[in-house]
Image: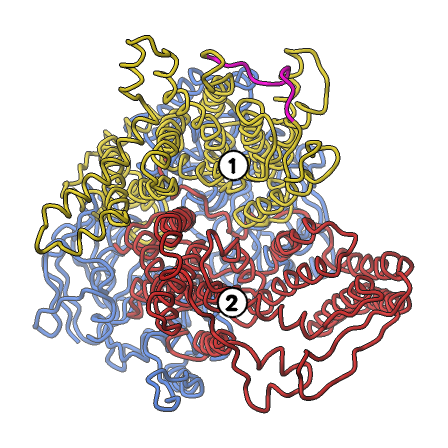
Chain colours: A yellow, B red, C blue
Amino acid sequence: MTPPETPPPETPPPDVAADVAAEPGAERWRSAVFDAVVEGNTVTVTFLAFVAAIVVGGLLIAFTDPNVLPKFGHFFSTPGAAIAAAWSSASGAYTAMFRGAIIDIHTVSAAFHGGSITAVFEPISETLVNATPLILTGLAVMLPFRCGLFNIGGTGQFIGGAVVAGWIGFALQLPPVVHVIAAIAGGLVGGAVCGWLVGFLRARTGANEVIVTIMFNYVAQFLLLYLLGTHAFRRPKRIDPISRVVHGTARMPHLLGSTLRVNFGFILAIGAAFAVSWLIKRSTVGFEFRTIGANPDAARAAGMNVERGYIVVMLVAGALAGLAGAAVVLGTDYSLTPGIYGSYGFDAITVALLGRGTSLGVVLASLLFGALHAGGVQMQAATQTPIDIVIVIQALIVLFIAAPPLVRTIFRLRGQRSGPEKRAALKVVGA
Amino acid sequence: MTTTLAPSLPPAASPRTRRRRRVDKKTLGGLVIGVLGLVDIVGFGLEARSGDARLGLTLAGASVHLSPLKLPPGPTAIVAGVITLVLAALWLRAELGKLARRAVIVGSGMLFMLSFLCWASSGKTMSLVGLLQSSVDRSIPIVLGALAGCLCERAGVVNIAIEGQLLFGAFAGAMVASASHSLYLGLVAAALAGALLGLILALFAIRYAVNQIVVGVVLNVLATGLTGYLYDRVLVKYQNTLNSPAVFSRISIPLLSKIPIVGPVLFDSSIFLYLTYVILVAVQIGLFRTRWGLRVRAVGEHPVAAETVGIRVLGIRYANVMLGGLVAGIGGAYLTIGSVGPFGKNVSSGKGFIALAAVIFGRWTPIGAMFGALLFGFADAVQNILSVLGTSIPSDFLLMIPYVATIVVVAGMVGRVRPPKADGQPYVKS
Amino acid sequence: MKLELRGITKRFGSVVANDHIDLTVEPGQIHALLGENGAGKSTLMNILYGLTRPDEGEILIDESPVAFTRPKDAIAAGIGMVHQHFMLVPVFTVAENVVLGDERTRRLGPLGFGLLDRRRAREDVLRVSQRFGLTVDPDALVENLPVGVQQRVEIIKALLRDATLLILDEPTAVLTPGETEDLFAVMRSLKESGHSIVFITHKLNEVQQMADTITVIRQGKVVGSMPPTASDEELAARMVGRAVRLAPEKAAATLGEIVLSVESLTVSDDLGNTAVRGVSFDIKAGEILGIAGVQGNGQTELCEALVGLRPAVDGRFAVRGRDLTGHATREILHAGVGYVPEDRQAEGLVTEFTVAENLALDRYDQPPYSKGLALNLDVMNAAATDQVKQFDIRTESIGSPASSLSGGNQQKVVVARELSRSVGLLIASQPTRGVDVGSIEFVHRRIVEVRNQGSAVLLVSTELDEIAALADRIAVMYEGEIVAMRSADVSREELGLLMAGGGAGAGASASAAGEPASAAAPA
């Protein structure tokens, strides 16, 4: 569905713009996309995108299952068996995923028969644990995005934070509360430095932050590898690259008893989400970020320092991603390993996109992806379905979300269009 | 205000946004060259160990044998350093033409590499030809990826998904070649897999006008996830049938491959290198000398103008993005059936992103991008050879070289290069 | 070719851009389409050229109906268009631009892909340019050519495609008076050779001078056809729909002390070329200094330098005696400088922000708009409500996005923002470009008010009418220099000549001698 009033961007066709006067080209396609996303009933589209991704993922699971494929060899003689096998493969994987992410009925019934009650909450705990770094790195992508920068450097900034937080955690001896605060602060600083560097390069040399952040990710990974080989980091008596263990004083406190991994890091993440939300909507700095993001030339003409905005926003974003690193090393892993950064940096991008540029959206998207990851682990263990399917589903969700017309086509929906009143109203609510 | 998906990214590339105070480029350039010269002298010259560095000029089994170049590392580095300092002075004092400036940059860079290599291989033998050959080989996927980038960006579509296309190509190439026992079938499959990803990119970027960087990034995630999933699920299980392809053998071009030094480097390689030559020349000539190229560039610079003279803007964009995917897919195939054989998870390891940097480095021209890619290939090869020679520099830092080089290049090139004007801008017809 | 449009209707959402338009262009005729900005002229022509599809209505060429789905169809039917914003690829040569889309090739072997035949392209350009007196170098890069020459390239492009009907969309907007005369000469010679021309404009004198028939369009409707003998008043009234007061009432200036003094200011453009060369002038309180000149003669860079958006390469400027050279934009604005940028959508507004946010764009971080780091939305909204009322900004609410406003109301938002703080110096660059007559009158009144309250105003405009209506003193910029400083009663002919770089008697020699050009200004 292309709305009729969408001329080319940048150079509007000779003067439709002046003629209609109301909206210039570049703005109109933006607002056209805005219409498509916001007016096309966001919730429906998001939900359907999720459904579509799950279905495609399910097909992928079923038709790569070594147990299913042979049955399709006899599809024409026994189609029922083939379809049943495919169904059970996909549904088995998803059921396992659900058990790992939300709740497992077996643990509930076990709890009634004298089993562990905490076991009932373990899937939820795992979901929250997985969501924690996603929320923080997701915010680290979303915030610069509002300022017009694309931070793909979540991985590098995460490493920066994890290294400093981890080092403070295992190398220093500090009193209990002070130690964990110092380590968290170290994580913030470590990430902030990495973010600042990107912002600085962008502001001073104009280097495209997309490329720079991607390259920094690799640099940070090798730096981590190098550090894990040094005396200051390496765990004694180990040949493999793994750091010393974070002292108990520097670990994040558990929230629901020591057997469940969910910890204070989650509270930090939620707190960060509130802070970022306030920053964007209600602070002068956020106003500046949004202005720069929407129109840097206008920002400059209004007296804003665009370069400083870039540096500050990347500094804050780096700190957020660094906090994610601290949350992982101080909250669950307790030591640095070469793969500690996981796929958080890139997952963060999908989280930020799914979250549509708001803090609440990022939190919800992180919970969803956190659940997918937590469930994915269970799924891999129970059904031997590789956990990478989760990444595929994630990417599919975002692709479908990015193009609501596609989702509508798939589900044969008619786009809802509403008058300008509604659009205006929505914008005010958002502001 | 509720922000939608990425389309609200600002037109950050507008010349206005670039305005900033900068150190005088000339002074800066001169200082950098001067520092290189000093490092030559102090770092490599005075610190050199005794024992000549022997740089091999022929490979084992070559028909014409050249004896290795024996250089004393200390004096060589000092002489190189002095020459570089003279060049730096020349740079700062004299008004140099464009060609002379480039010569100074290339010259001081090569002298630096020479003194560095002598320093590193002091008392040992290092095969210079081997190093160059490995550089060229390593740059093949980067060149092809960069050509994919040129094809797309010249038509106004930013292709961040090169990385994913390489990965898709590598996967499809290995699997099909292994299953069908035909390397050529594998190559075709790889190209088609790349083109398929190109089609998806085109569909989202053109039809749905989704921000091109967003689609590209998400497609990379998709490619990583999908190939990773299929690898674990299928390839590992059926390793013998689906993931043990043969590798394209080297084809020596008669006569040409016998030329000393140049021959083994440029004319004694697998079909991929020759394909790269062909595609490179085709894209360069195609873009700048043909009707097709004129139209492509018009679409990338000023799509509305192209539309007003009857050019199908969207059609050209679709075609070019898919063509780019095709080329990148071939580059991906090199990573498996062109070099190591079986597919491994994330085998592209960022080469697609480096290709993107090579495009910028080469100012959006195929030939320029090729030089950029060669530079990265060379850095990669040096890193590899040094870890074999065992220098005092930790290998992790050597591994960083290509990535740091990219950052330096990208940060240094800005302002001096101009991307196609409509690059990254969706074109929506009224 | 005889062209007929019947009942053409085009809607953009709820806006009706063209409402059942009928129009007939006879062969060999110059047919003027007169209407103010936003009347729907360009939309109509885009429909005719196949760029936009009409919702209703039909097009007939030589009595037979045609349907254009893309420009290629229109080109094939013999229609050529010179757009207001040139459809040229800046990094291509003239020849490349001219042949684009219709290239001749030399076969390269058996392959279908042919190499471009550049020699042929060059010859084609020269042939057409000689025939119609359109001098141009086929090998020049378009981005290096002055706009007048670029326009010639556009015309050659159309003629080479055998256009028999040419649409010229506001062709004089970017030209000097001299270049305009050249263009008119070309138009006459085209007419003689049997071409029809649709001449879109909002300038009354040009219509009277050139047109054979005039069709007036207002708010998307044809409101009448008139002969070229119709008077200014008749045409203007028809175009705007009411009697228009062309200039605001203005008492004689009461000059105060010097507010802005500029001393041999030199500024570079984005490419590093000198755009402003050693310009000097003063503006006193209660005075409007108009800077006349053709677009691209350094006015943009001058304004940007004065608000700190562009560094001064040399020279300095001071506001109320305080040297502000090299200061940040923010400091300059805080020193009491108001700035209305020339392109409201690119620099004046954030179109996706609300009206209220746009009105706070340059003071969001100062009390009472902010408390510490926090925005005070109540104050922001109250102030916005107030300004919307005061400046008659027609918007649904202060929460509507600026993009939903008409061009005139968008401009009022910018003006309201800049004038609702205390401003000792107002720098207004093209303050009424592309807005409707009602808004022009409003903005003009406001500018005069500011001046009457004792502020200094620097008004940059390429519209001589605007300069003549508002300025107390007129400086003419040509190639980065102020070539003349004249009192407000200077004749339009003289201004036109000066803008084209000619006859710059005293002014040119003054600046050539290195004296400040303001010395040439009447006291």
Foreground pick, B221 / C450: B221
Give me the chain letter of mark 2.
B
Task: In the rendered view, tell whether residue A363 sits above or below residue C426.
Answer: above
Identity, as a three-letter code, of the amino acid under mark 2: Ser
Q: Residues within 10 Å of mark 2 (few under 14, many from 20)?
A: some
Q: Name the residue located 46 percent from the left edge and 66 percent from the top edge.
A: B331
Quick check: do tags 1 and 2 share a chain?
Answer: no
Magenta stretch encompasses residue A248: yes
Res. A129 image quadrant: top left
Foreground pick, B52 / C411: B52
Q: Secondary structure at mark 1?
A: loop
Identity, as a three-letter code, of the amino acid under mark 1: Ala
Q: Which residue is mark 1?
A: C252
Residue C43 rendering spot, x and y as whole percentages:
24, 55
Give me the chain letter of mark 1.
C
Residue B401: mark in rendering: none
Left or right of residue C44, residue B182 in this image? right
Foreground pick, C201 / C46: C46
Tell me the chief SS of the magenta region: loop
Q: Secondary structure at mark 2?
A: helix
Q: Which residue is mark 2?
A: B339
Residue C151 rendering spot, x and y as whole percentages:
41, 69
Residue C359 rendering spot, x and y as whole percentages:
44, 28
Left or right of residue A182, residue A407 in this image? left
The quadrant of the image that shows the C terminus of chain A is: top left
Which portion, as a residue range, is magenta? A245-255
